[in-house]
Image: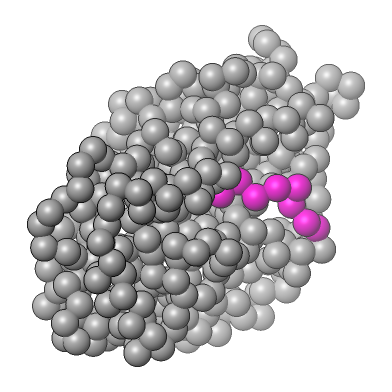
Amino acid sequence: MRIAIVVPYVWQVRGNRLAFSLAKELAAHHDVVVLVEAIQDRIIDDVRRQLSPAALWFLRRTRSTSVSNRKLLARQLSRGGDRRISQSLREFHVGSPLDWVVSFANEGHWVGDYVSRWQASNRPRTALVMMDPIDQIFLLARDRPNPRVRELLLPLYPILHQIEAGRIRRFDRLFSISRWISELCVSLYGRRPMASLAAVDAEVFRPLPGIDGSPPYIAVPTVSIGPGEEPLLRSLFENGLPLVTYGPRAIQGIPHRGYLPDPELVSFLNGARLTLFLFDYEGLGLVPLESLAVGTPVVTQPKGGPLAELSENRFVRFADDPATLLSHCRHLLDEPKTSGLVNEVRSGIGDHFVSEVALRWARNLES
């Protein structure tokens, strides 16, 4: 198959890791190109490396590193970028016919409408991989920044919902990034995605040889931490848990490692006795999958993507209240991290390895 995967705006790898991993895996057996409308110029080489053997095509570079929620919403609703992408897709298709055009981002949802207007007998089929429904801007207002602004904009919600529902209908097939997003699609749009594509790159995230004998610590990602989780983390730290945070935010008083490139992140997760993943909202739950892939158990909250994907995994413990979270963490801290345990934890998510997910996805597209 010849597949074009559309990821309209790429300012950072984080957030696009799933799309890139699946594109790379599909390219082992199919002709795959990832088409980007605008990409941050400093990460082009890194993106190409992560995609290879899939090809990267982009229409323009940008040096802008600041992306506000307002800009993201504007890009989700505007047609300009999607129109330019669709024109490029048409040129690709004329030169060498495409079998599939797949939009894999919160943006790019007009692409299905544009491609559907091509000559019906010769056009490629289209698919949309749902990430976070645009409805969440309003539905999560109580948990997200600027809730009062969102409440003032609430009269726009019915219009926004109808626009999104219409765009989704223009795609031939619908997929999602997790079972949680699939359930949201059923609830909001009355359409069930054909499959969840939740996956982790098991070649990047893998156990390292040997067991770290240093004092045990708990890895704490801050990528999805909200105002409600900060005081909870401080309370757990004050109760003696050896927390070490990593990611975009530091929590005052708790040791912080900052942003970790993949090799350092893999080493950090390998050395941890467990990963504590607290979040205000998470549609996929890639962080727990990365931890489990290196053999490190997870404690997290019973909601969103992590619960939907990992509720039956015995190496993931769920809790909301501080006392139970503290109990789970202390229990795992006291449990020796042997090579046998590491291998058992990793094998428990074999169905989520990107090689397996990409194979199932390809069979679905071929059918």
Quarter of the figure with the N terminus: top right
In the image, taking residue 305 as reference, residue 271 lies left or right, namely: left
Which segment did they paint magenta? 191-198
Q: Is residue 75 above or below residue 362?
A: below
- Say which residue appears at 63% left-offset and 31% top-offset: 359
Could you tell me residue 34's position as x and y percent?
A: 52, 28
Could you tell me residue 194's position as x and y percent?
A: 75, 47
Quarter of the figure with the C terminus: top right
Closest to the observer, 175 or 28: 28
Q: Is residue 141 above or below residue 52?
A: below
Closest to the observer, 181 or 103: 181
In the image, taking residue 348 as reference, residue 85 lies left or right, namely: right
Closest to the observer, 288 or 178: 288
In the image, taking residue 216 as reference, residue 24 lies left or right, namely: right
In the image, taking residue 341 as reference, residue 155 lies left or right, namely: right
- Say which residue appears at 28% left-offset and 53% top-offset: 338
State the residue lying farthest toward the top: 95
Whether residue 199 is visible: no
Could you tell me residue 334's position as x and y percent?
A: 24, 71
What secondary structure do most residues of the magenta stretch adopt?
Answer: loop
State the residue lying farthest toward the right: 121
- Say which residue appears at 35% left-offset and 49% top-offset: 340
- Say which residue appears at 56% left-offset and 67% top-offset: 311
Q: How is the image coloured?
A: one colour
Could you tell me residue 74's position as x and y percent?
A: 52, 57
Q: Is residue 330 magenta?
A: no
Whether residue 299 is visible: yes
Disc tally is: 0
Q: Is residue 153 above or below residue 135?
A: below
